[in-house]
Amino acid sequence: MPYPLDFHFFMFLTITLSSLYQYLPSEEFIENNKKEIKTIGLLTSIALAIAAYLTSPTLIQYFYQTFVDSIPLVQIMSLAVIPQTIVAILTANRLGNKKSRTVLIVLD
């Protein structure tokens, strides 16, 4: 089952961006808008996603020979870091601006 390996890659990539999520709400609360940090965080996530997408086949074939079937899954999960970063930035923005109401989505 290749699921654990691709999820591990995803979590490894999001760990580096969790510091961005921890830092931004306090800056937004004191109305210190840090567009440079948001831009750097987003560009970093794009760079990490591209690097993981391109290097994951080599890394998996070298270190995890039994998980070669999971290469496409790891590549897809590595690209999921970009929307995850956007969600973290927008959530931090809402929390910092004291607009933290719960969003309710009802599917029929």
Image (cartoon, rainbow, N blue to C red):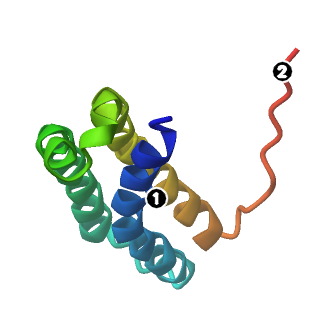
Give the vertical position of 47 relative to 36 (above or below): above
Q: Which residue is mark 2?
A: 107
Using the image, tell me which numbered label, if any, was put on residue 50: none
Residue 16, picture quadrant: bottom left
Of all residues, the one furthest to the front in this rendering is 66
Question: Along the horizontal axis of the image, is 44 left or right of 99?
Answer: left
Residue 76 point in image, percent of width and height: 35, 32
For the residues bearing labels 1 and 2, Cβ distance under 8 angstroms: no
Q: Residue furthest top?
A: 108
Element type where label 1 sits in the image: helix
Q: Of the residues shown, which amino acid type is indicated by label 2?
A: Leu
* Residue drawn where x is 53% and y is 63% of the image: 93
Cα gap from disc 1 to disc 2, whole angstroms:
25 Å
Residue 38 in which image quadrant: bottom left
The residue under label 1 is which amino acid type? Answer: Ile
Image quarter of the C terminus:
top right
Quadrant of residue 74 in the image? top left
User: Could you say whether the residue bearing mark 2 is in a helix, strand or loop?
Assistant: loop
Q: Is residue 39 visible?
A: yes
Circle 1 residue: 89
Image vertical order of residue 28 relative to residue 87, above or below? below
Q: Name which residue lies at 34% across and 58% down.
A: 13
Position above or below: 38 against 62: below
How many residues crowd around disc 2 within 10 Å: few (fewer than 14), some, or many (20 or more)?
few
Residue 6 locus on image (x, y percent)? 41, 43
